[in-house]
Amino acid sequence: MRYICLVHFDVQATIAAMSPAEQRQLDIDSLAYDEELKANGNLVVAEALQPPENAVLVRVRNGAMSATDGPFIETKEQLAGFVLIEARDLNDAVRIAAGIPLAKYGTIEVRAMYEIPQHEQPAG
């Protein structure tokens, strides 16, 4: 089953506070863990995200689209990346998520992927 591990952390309290050598080591550790997951058949894809300041929030209401520049959430931890994995079950996914190096600095949210059912006829 596929699970997404959403990586949340406070950029100002972690990355921005790290020395260049610490940042480099975190990058090395993160890429090494991705390779370990890949070798074990668990990794589907892993990506880091640009900071929330570079995001755009898109909404469509009553047929009208609006776009707002980020950031949007008044919280310290922001979504910073994701790791899409294959795991036997939720316990296995949680075990894998605990190995993500940024779990030491923030929160890893683990969610099972939802399979959208295929429908023959439109609803109604």
Image (cartoon, helix red, strand yellow):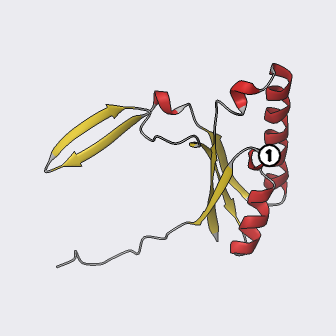
Query: What residue lies at 48% left-to-right and 28% top-to-bottom?
Result: 53
| Image quarter of residue 88 | bottom right
Query: What residue lies at 85% left-to-right and 42% top-to-bottom?
Result: 32
Horizontally, is 94 left or right of 4 in the view?
A: right
Image quadrant where one finds the N terminus: bottom right
Where residue 17 sits: x, y (%)? 74, 26
Where residue 29 sits: x, y (%)? 85, 39
| Image quarter of residue 5 | bottom right
Residue 18, placed above or below residue 90 = above
Q: Secondary structure at mark 1?
A: helix
| Image quarter of residue 44 | bottom right
Where residue 3 sits: x, y (%)? 63, 64
Horizontally, is 80 left or right of 93 in the view?
A: left
Horizontally, is 23 left or right of 111 in the view?
A: right
Label 1 CA crowd tier, 10 Å (few <14, some 14–19, many 20+):
some
Residue 92, placed above or below residue 51 = below
From the viewer's side, name the closer residue of 101 and 46. Answer: 101
Q: Which residue is mark 1?
A: 101
The amino acid beneath tag 1 is Pro
Residue 13, placed above or below residue 19 = below
Q: How many marks?
A: 1
Query: What residue lies at 81% left-to-right and 22% top-to-bottom?
Result: 19
Q: Residue furthest left?
A: 62
Image quadrant where one finds the C terminus: bottom left
Query: What residue lies at 63% left-to-right and 66% top-to-bottom?
Result: 2
Where residue 91 sits: x, y (%)? 74, 73
